Amino acid sequence: MHFMAGPAGSQSLGPLGLHRTPHSLYMVFLMVLIMMSLVSAQQPKYLRCYRCLLETKELGCLLGSDICLAPAGSSCLTLHIKNSSGTDILVSDCRRKEQMSDCSHTRTSPVFGYWIFSQCCFLDFCNNPQNRVLNLP
C-alpha cells in the first residue's frame, strides 16, 4: 500500500473510513448528551434537607448540623420554638409523607410560656438558613 503526499494522499485513506471519524465521534457525543439529559430529567429519589437540632438566628446552628434524606414526596421541616419575649429557637429536619400531619400549624409547647410553629417546604435544602428567609416566616 502506497501513501502519497498532498491532497491525493489524504483521499487514499477514504476507503479505511478515517475521514469520517470526527463525524462519528460527534454523533456518539450527541447521543451521550441526550441520554444524560433524559436521566437527569427524572424525578430525584430523595429530598435533601438541612438538619440542625438546636439553632438560633443570632448564633446559627449550635448542635447537629447535617443533611438528611427523605423519600420523594416527603418534606423539609423547620420548627420555630418561641416565647413572648421573642426568643426563637429553631429545629430543622426531614419529614416523611406519613409524618407531615404536623406541617404548617401552631401549638403550645410542653414548656410553659413557649409555643411551636412548624413549617414544611418541598424543595432540596429549602429549610437551610439562606433559603429559609424566602420560604418561612
Image (tube, rainbow, N blue to C red):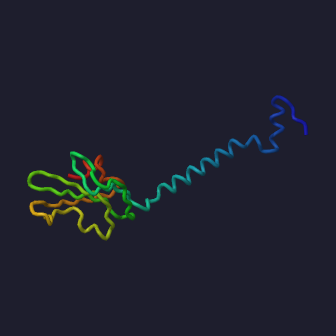
Nearest the camera: 123 or 51?
A: 51
Count the numbered circles shown: 0
Q: Work out whether 17 lies above or below 127.
A: above
The reply, left or right, for residue 111 in relation to residue 121 is left
Nearest the camera: 4 or 111?
A: 111
Q: Residue drawn at (32%, 68%), measured in percent from left and top?
A: 97
Place of residue 78 in the rendered image (x, y in percent of width and height, measured from the top left): 25, 57
The reply, left or right, for residue 24 in relation to residue 81 is right
Q: Residue furthest bottom?
A: 98
Q: Residue furthest top?
A: 6
Occupied quadrant, residue 118: bottom left
Nearest the camera: 58 or 48?
A: 58
Q: Work out whether 52 lies above or below 12.
A: below
Q: Residue drawn at (39%, 63%), measured in percent from left and top?
A: 72
Place of residue 49 in the rendered image (x, y in percent of width and height, measured from the top left): 34, 56
Place of residue 6 in the rendered image (x, y in percent of width and height, measured from the top left): 82, 28
Q: Residue furthest right?
A: 1
Place of residue 71 in the rendered image (x, y in percent of width and height, measured from the top left): 39, 65
Q: Residue drawn at (81%, 39%), measured in percent from left and top?
A: 13
Occupied quadrant, residue 113: bottom left
Quadrant the N terminus occupies: top right
